[in-house]
C-alpha cells in the first residue's frame, strides 16, 4: 500500500517530499495511526511502493491530479482528505472507498452523504503529541509555505513575535505553536494544530492563491466561520541577487518595515477564535471510529496477503 500526499515529481519520477508542515504531517502521523495493524517494529514498513492500493491522506488531494498520479490504483482509500485545487473530480468510481473527507463542503462536492464530511485528520495530533504549554510569545506568525522566508522572519524579530517556518520538522512546528499565546496563520494546518492544542488563532490572507474553499470546508467542520484578516504579500529577499547592492538592501528593509506595521496593526485589532472543545473531542472520537473501520479492513486483508 502506498501513502499518497502532496509531493513534486522530478525527472526520474521519484517522489520527493515537499517541505511543508501540513503535508509532512502524513509522514509523522500515519505510522502512529496504523502502528497496530501489522505490529511491526518499524511502522514505516506499513507503506511500500505498491501503487495498486493507495491511502489518500491529509491534504487538499481530491482532484483529477490524484487519478493522474495513481493510474495503477485498483483501490483508493480516502481518509479525511479535502477537495480543492486543479480540475475537480467529476465522480468517484468503484476504485474509491471513502471513510471520511475534510468537511461538509468536500462531501457535497463529491456527492457523498453528509456524515462523510467529518474533519481534517490533522486534529489527531492531539492524541500523539503533548508539547508543554509554555508561552514565549504573545503572537507568532506562520505564513503560507509559498510565502515563507527570511523576510517574514526579520519582520517577526523586529516585533518580538515568534516566527514559525512551515518547512521545519513537524514536532518543532507543533512545539512553537504551543509556545504562542495567539497564532496568526496563513497556513491552514497551523490553524488546525492550534485548534487541536487549544491555542487561539487568527486566519490571515496575503494572496489569492490561499484557497478559500479549503478553509471554509475545514472551518465548517469545527463550527467556525472563515473570516481572514488581509495583509499585503511580502516578497522575500533573494540571497544571491537582492542583497548584492545597497539599493536592493534598502528596498527589502523598506518592504519589511511596512510589513511589520501591517502585522502589528493586525495583531492589535484582531479577534482570536477557538472552536468548542467538546465538539472537537466528539470529532476526534468519531475520526478514531472511522480509523478503526480502516484498520479492520486492512487486517481483514482487503489489500491481499
Image (spheres, rainbow, N blue to C red):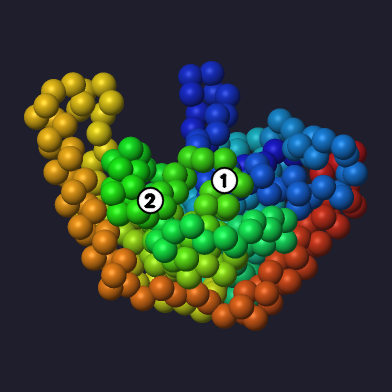
Q: Give the residue at mark 1.
A: 172
Residue 234 appears in the figure: yes
Dot 2 surroundings within 10 Å: few (below 14), some, or many (20 or more)?
A: many
Residue 123, x across and y down, in percent: 62, 62
Can you say whether 164 is above or below 193 in the image? above
Quadrant of the image for the C terminus?
top right
Q: Which residue is mark 2?
A: 143
* Vertical side of 217 occupied by 170: above or below: above
Local packing at callout 1 (Cα closer than 10 Å; few below 14, some 14-19, many 20+) is some
Report x, y in % for residue 141.
Answer: 39, 55
Task: State the residue in front, 265 or 121.
Answer: 265
Q: Residue at x 40, y 61 (%)?
A: 139
Can you say whether 5 is above or below 187 in the image? above
Q: Are marks 2 and 1 in contact (CB under 8 Å)?
A: no
Quick one: label 2 or label 1, which is nearer the N terminus? 2
User: Furthest residue to the left?
Assistant: 247
Q: Position of residue 206 (x, y in %)?
A: 27, 55
Give the residue at x 50% y 37%.
19
- Labelled disc at residue 38: none
Q: CA distance from mark 2 to mark 1?
A: 15 Å
Q: Is residue 147 visible?
A: no
Label 2's element? loop
For the N terminus, the quadrant is: top right
Q: In this picture, is 69 found above or below 211?
A: above
| Location of residue 254 (image quadrant) | top left
Left or right of 245, for residue 228: right
Residue at 77% x, 68% y is 289
Amino acid at each position: 500500500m502506498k501513502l499518497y500526499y502532496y509531493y513534486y515529481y522530478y525527472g526520474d519520477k521519484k517522489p520527493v517530499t515537499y517541505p511543508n508542515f501540513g503535508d509532512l504531517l502524513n509522514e509523522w502521523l500515519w505510522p502512529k495511526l496504523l502502528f497496530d495493524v501489522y505490529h511491526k517494529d518499524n511502522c514505516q514498513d506499513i507503506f511500500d511502493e505498491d501503487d495498486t492500493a493507495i491511502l489518500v491522506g491529509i491534504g487538499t488531494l481530491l482532484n483529477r491530479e490524484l487519478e493522474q498520479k495513481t493510474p495503477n490504483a485498483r483501490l483508493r482509500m480516502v481518509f479525511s482528505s479535502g477537495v480543492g485545487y486543479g480540475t475537480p473530480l467529476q465522480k468517484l468510481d468503484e476504485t474509491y472507498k471513502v471513510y471520511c473527507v475534510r468537511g461538509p463542503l468536500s462531501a457535497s462536492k463529491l456527492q457523498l452523504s453528509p456524515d462523510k464530511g467529518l474533519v481534517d485528520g490533522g486534529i489527531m495530533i492531539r492524541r500523539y503529541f503533548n508539547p508543554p504549554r509554555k508561552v514565549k510569545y504573545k503572537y507568532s506568525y506562520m505564513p503560507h509555505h509559498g510565502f515563507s522566508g527570511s523576510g517574514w522572519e526579520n519582520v517577526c524579530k523586529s516585533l518580538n513575535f515568534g516566527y514559525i517556518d512551515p518547512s521545519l520538522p513537524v514536532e518543532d512546528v507543533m512545539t512553537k505553536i504551543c509556545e504562542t499565546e495567539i497564532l496568526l496563520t496563513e497556513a491552514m494546518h497551523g490553524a488546525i494544530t492550534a485548534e487541536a492544542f487549544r491555542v487561539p488563532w487568527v486566519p490571515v490572507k496575503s494572496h489569492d492563491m490561499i484557497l478559500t474553499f479549503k478553509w471554509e470546508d475545514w472551518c465548517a467542520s469545527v463550527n467556525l466561520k472563515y473570516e481572514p484578516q488581509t495583509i499585503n504579500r511580502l516578497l522575500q529577499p533573494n540571497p544571491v541577487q537582492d542583497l548584492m547592492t545597497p539599493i536592493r538592501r534598502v528596498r527589502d528593509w523598506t518592504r519589511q518595515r511596512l510589513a511589520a506595521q501591517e502585522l502589528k496593526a493586525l495583531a492589535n485589532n484582531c479577534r482570536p477564535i477557538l472552536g468548542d472543545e467538546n465538539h472537537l473531542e466528539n470529532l476526534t472520537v468519531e475520526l478514531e471510529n472511522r480509523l478503526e473501520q480502516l484498520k479492520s479492513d486492512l487486517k481483514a486483508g482487503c489489500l491481499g496477503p
